[in-house]
């Protein structure tokens, strides 16, 4: 009896740990509200936190820049391109305290109007669903093997 009870609690412990450690399958809408001021150079040093483990300067943004074209930005192609970039690192980007979302939009805002993706990308209740991304959602950063 005690053995069965121990196994029961052990099972639920590992189930809880597994659920807690799974990465989100969405990009939170809060991420889309991250605003970067215009400008480059020294401004980047002060605005982009340096505790993000991702170097967005080395990421391949061609899925986004190749699909999302102005002056009339198509929500379907632009949001899909955005998700192909953001869904590579959903856990890091959804953490608004580490600077990853700011770093991501620092690069994106060099190519697209401010607030573009916040205005045109609307999907599920939690945010943009990474499972609904078409195309190569996971690409290695440029310069890696």
Image (cartoon, rainbow, N blue to C red):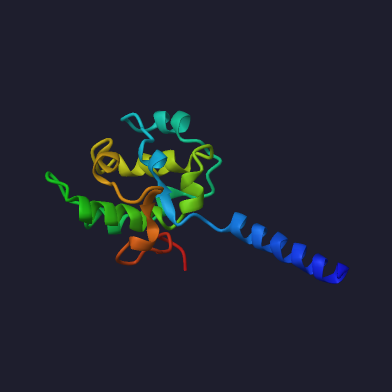
Residue at position x 36%, y 36% in the image: 33
Left or right: 33 with respect to 74?
right
Q: Nearer the viewer, residue 118 or 13?
A: 13
Res 21 visible: yes
Residue that protrudes farthest toward the front in the picture: 1
Residue 119: image quadrant is top left
Res 60 visible: no
Residue at position x 41%, y 39% in the image: 30
| Residue 134 on image: x %, y % | 30, 65
Residue 44: image quadrant is top left
Left or right: 118 with respect to 141?
left
| Residue 108 on image: x %, y % | 32, 44
| Residue 92 on image: x %, y % | 51, 49
Residue at position x 60%, y 58% in the image: 19
Residue that protrudes farthest toward the right in the picture: 2
Q: Nearer the viewer, residue 116 or 7?
A: 7
Q: Nearer the viewer, residue 78 or 16?
A: 16
Left or right: 138 with respect to 21?
left
| Residue 48 on image: x %, y % | 46, 35
Residue 20: image quadrant is bottom right
Residue that protrudes farthest toward the left in the picture: 71
Residue at position x 24%, y 44% in the image: 120
The quarter of the rendered structure image containing the N terminus is bottom right
């Amino acid at each position: 009896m005690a053995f069965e009870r121990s196994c029961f609690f052990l099972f639920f412990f590992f189930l809880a740990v597994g659920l807690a450690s799974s990465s989100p399958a969405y990009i939170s809408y809060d991420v889309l509200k991250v605003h970067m001021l215009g400008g480059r150079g020294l401004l980047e040093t002060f605005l982009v936190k340096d505790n993000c483990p991702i170097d967005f300067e080395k990421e391949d943004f061609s899925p986004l820049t190749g699909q999302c074209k102005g002056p009339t930005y198509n929500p379907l192609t632009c949001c899909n391109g955005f998700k192909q970039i953001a869904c590579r690192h959903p856990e890091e980007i959804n953490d608004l305290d580490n600077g990853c979302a700011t770093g991501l939009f620092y690069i994106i805002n060099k190519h697209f109007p401010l607030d573009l993706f916040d205005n045109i990308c609307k999907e599920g209740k939690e945010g943009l669903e990474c499972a609904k991304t078409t195309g190569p959602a996971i690409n290695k950063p440029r310069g890696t093997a």
